[in-house]
Structure formats: C-alpha cells, structure tokens
Image (cartoon, grey):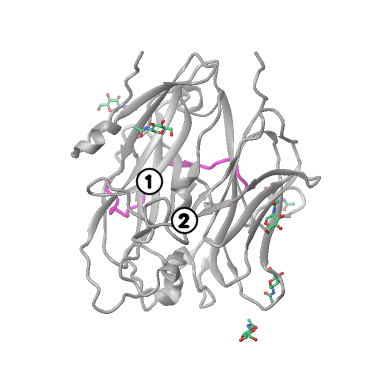
Amino acid sequence: MRLISKSFIFPLSIFVMLSSTTYSQPRSPNVIQSTTYLSKEFEVGPREVADKQMYNIEFPKGHVGIKSFDVDLVDEHGNFVPLHETYIHHWFILKYIIKKNMSMSQDPNDHTKPSGDLIYKRNDGTCNNGILPHQWSSGSETRGTSTKLPYPFAVEIGNPADITEGWEEQWLLGVLVIDTRGVENKKICTQCRCDQFNLPENFYDVTVGFHGKVTPEYKAGVLCCQDKFQCKMRKGFQAPRRNLAIRYNITWVNWDQHQSAVRFYVLDVTDRVTTNGSETIHDCRAEFTITENNSTNLFHVQKASIPMKKGGYLIYATGHAHTGVINATLYGQDGRILCTSTPTYGTGKEAGNEEGYLVGMSVCYPKLGSMKIDDGETVTVESIYKNEFLPAVMGDMHFYLADAPPQVV
Ligand SMILES: *[C@@H]1O[C@H](CO)[C@@H](O)[C@H](O)[C@H]1NC(C)=O
Ligand SMILES: *[C@@H]1O[C@H](CO)[C@@H](O)[C@H](O)[C@H]1NC(C)=O
Ligand SMILES: *[C@@H]1O[C@H](CO)[C@@H](O)[C@H](O)[C@H]1NC(C)=O
Ligand SMILES: *[C@@H]1O[C@H](CO)[C@@H](O)[C@H](O)[C@H]1NC(C)=O
Ligand SMILES: *[C@@H]1O[C@H](CO)[C@@H](O)[C@H](O)[C@H]1NC(C)=O
Ligand SMILES: *[C@@H]1O[C@H](CO)[C@@H](O)[C@H](O)[C@H]1NC(C)=O
C-alpha cells in the first residue's frame, strides 16, 4: 500500500523524484510517511549574511508524530551548497500557536514581527526567555546528524486536545547562513567576529541582545551576523548573487495508540543556575568564548549542572556545537554517562564532507528503557573544545525523554 502524503510542487524535475515516499516501521502497524519540502527562496551575495525567519512553513497536517526532521541548503538548481561556499551557521524550527484566520506573511524579507494573537511554545529545556526555545535545530553539522526517533517514539503534534478552539499550531523556520565566497578568511567570518563585518556606525549604541545593550566587549556572536551584514572580502573577487532555499525532509506517522510521545530538551553549558529561594532561575547565554592561553591543558572544558524538574527515559541525545569541539557529554547526578556525542570533521570538498568543518555529531540511542533520569535529578552538560581562541562557540545537549519505557510485547 502506498499512502500519498502531501507532495511538494517544485519547478525543477529533479525534485519530482523527491516528493514523497513511505516505508514500514518495524513492529508497527503504522506506516512512516515522508515528504520533502522547500522553503521560500532567499537571496544572498558573496560575503553577505542572510538571517531569515519564515512563518507558517509547510508541515504535515493533522494529529501526527514526527519521526525525523532533516534539513539541507540548496541553490536554485536544487544542488546542495557546500559549507565553504555558504556556511550554515544555524537553522531552527519554533512552534507557535496563532488565532485562526490571522494572516501571516511568508516572505523571508518581511521583518515585521507579528504581535498579539500569537504565542510561542518553548521546548522542555531550561533556558530563560527566548533563548534556545526551538523544537528542532542544528548548524553546520546538519547533514551528518541523524534526527530519527526509534519506534514507538515520536514528537506528537497537532493533537486537537492540546489546541485551544479557534487557534492553530504553526511553525517558524529561522535560518542564518553566511556566503563566504571570496572573503578574506572564511574561518573567521563563520565565527561572526565583529571586527570582520561592516557594522553600522552606531552598532554598539543601538544593539540589544537577550542580556541588554551590547558593549564594546562583545567581540563575536550572532549579533554581529545580522541580515545583510558583510564580511571582509578579497580585492577583486566577483561572483553572482544567488537564491538559496532550505530543503527539509520530515518523516511522520499518523498518531494512534501505538505511538509514544517524547519531550524535547535543550540544555546549555552556559546556563548559570541559581535560586531565589523558591524557584530555580536559569540564565543561558548560548554563545561563549574560549580564550587561547598558554596553560598546558590541551582542552577547554565548559559545563553546567542543571536540575531537571521532571525526568524520564532517555530515547535520543546528541550535542550541538561548533567547529573545534572534541566531544559533548550528558552526565547523571551520580556521574554516570548518559550520552557522549562526538564530532565528524569533513575531509573533502563536497557538501556534507567539507574539509575542516564540523559536518556531523554522533547520536546516542540507549537501549530502550535502559537509561533513566529521575524527577529532580541534577544532570551535567559538558562541552570539551580544543584549547585555542574560539569566539562564539556553543555547547548544547539536545535530547528526548519519554514517560514510560516501551512496552515489551
Ligand atoms: C526523507 O528521509 C527519510 C529518512 O532519512 C528517507 O527514507 C526518505 O527517502 C527521505 N525522503 C525524501 C523524499 O527525500
Ligand atoms: C475563518 O474564515 C473562514 C472564511 O472566511 C470562516 O468561514 C471561518 O469561520 C473563520 N474562522 C474563524 C475561527 O474565525
Ligand atoms: C522567585 O521567582 C519566581 C518566578 O519569577 C517568583 O514567582 C517568586 O515570587 C520568587 N520568589 C522569591 C522568594 O523571590
Ligand atoms: C603564549 O606563549 C607565546 C610564546 O611564548 C607568546 O608569544 C604568547 O603571547 C603567549 N600567549 C598568551 C595568551 O600568553
Ligand atoms: C586556560 O585554559 C584552561 C583549560 O581550558 C582553563 O582551565 C583556564 O581557565 C584558562 N586560563 C585562562 C587564563 O583563561
Ligand atoms: C572527551 O574528550 C576528552 C579529550 O579527548 C577525553 O579526555 C574525555 O574522556 C572525553 N569524554 C568522554 C566522556 O568520552
């Protein structure tokens, strides 16, 4: 039997082959469906940053369980764009609910933010405010990092019981890429070092981040990689501007009693955990700087211990990091290793294997039911980097927890 999922209409024939496929899920009576979507196009030229947000992107409809969410960057001919041409700094998918019939611009260049009648829905992670609220995200490692959830687990979406009458769930795609064709130093541009970009003259007077106004001590990070900012270019380099798009492949199942829902957590190594007496307060920065120094240490260790209100069975875990990472680990309170995620660095030229770039992070799939985080347990997230100057790197663990171990049948 072939279930037809929503197919994507794309002008180029190469994509016709990619419209939709189905395959059987082990031990499940249900069928996994798969669709590849293409985002709206956005234009970027040599040395330029593109920081785009696209509301109400195409997504599987109805009450379904998402099994995987894979993202790639393609040009107008449908070719994968390698990181040494356009660096994928990050992409993220954010869930929100919105009053039905509220119109929402899908134009990536429309920067008017919707107001009222729209509520963002955070993941179950612990960061404060709008920091790391996404449901899926990745960076340069996107092509080499599995997002698959094993049977019977899936991210449940579109459950009518969870959605207020008159509202609907929608999804925002955020993407930050840097076109490094022709720049003086690709590595430094991709680190969003402020002194490499043509910041507006009043940058330090007007720029406000999650922690207030930036000061001249802010030397690198996403605030210096805003839409249309330009990195230093080699003299005389010329290349045409081009249209890029995000290609995303979602696999899912129709929700039924055979599926088990998971909760998604992002824990961040910069989280400064304090308490005000009654509540735990989190303060995440997401980006941090590794200062090169002459210590005999080969490694830089960044970590945070974070109490988990609610625990569960660990189903999937992986690290999110930047180039320079050596490993990322999630520990239990007693020091047991719940997951160590290790990087893959590229060795070639082609997309997915670009030399020197972080192109994948390994994923832990513990034997189902074998690893559990207790309610109230304090876990530790750790990122180990090379001990060298690396401004604006990140260290997150992304993981899924389930309430119950899979039923043995
Ligand atoms: C989407 O990803 C799944 C799992 O990786 C794969 O089996 C399927 O062929 C992909 N579908 C398309 C349309 O590329
Ligand atoms: C949305 O608009 C349609 C068509 O105009 C209308 O039939 C429907 O009742 C509206 N829904 C809500 C929730 O306002
Ligand atoms: C601690 O913070 C919470 C959340 O902001 C607040 O509701 C509570 O009143 C605070 N408690 C004290 C003792 O300050
Ligand atoms: C480290 O040592 C080298 C060689 O002695 C020196 O040139 C450099 O300035 C030192 N760096 C720091 C951060 O102290
Ligand atoms: C030098 O690096 C080591 C290893 O990460 C770190 O423990 C130490 O704090 C660093 N020293 C300075 C002065 O930054
Ligand atoms: C992470 O890498 C460091 C440096 O190689 C190593 O000492 C450490 O044991 C690794 N961590 C884990 C949990 O494997």
Q: Position of residue 279 (x, y in %)?
A: 72, 48
Q: Which residue was labeled with disc 2?
A: 346
Q: Nearer the viewer, residue 160 or 384?
A: 384
| Image vertical order of residue 126 relative to residue 259, above or below | below
Q: Residue at x 34, y 35 (%)?
A: 36
First in residue order: circle 1 vs circle 2? 1
Residue interval drawn in magenta:
107-128
Q: Judging from the image, what secondary structure is the residue with disc 1 in? A: strand
Q: Residues within 10 Å of mark 1 (few under 14, many from 20)?
A: many
Judge whether residue 400 can be spotted in this image. Answer: no
- Whether the magenta-drawn stretch holds residue 324 is answered as no
Residue 89, picture quadrant: bottom left
Q: Amino acid at mark 2?
A: Gly
Q: Residue at x 57, y 72 (%)?
A: 389
Q: Position of residue 395 (x, y in %)?
A: 59, 56
Q: Which residue was labeled with disc 1?
A: 72
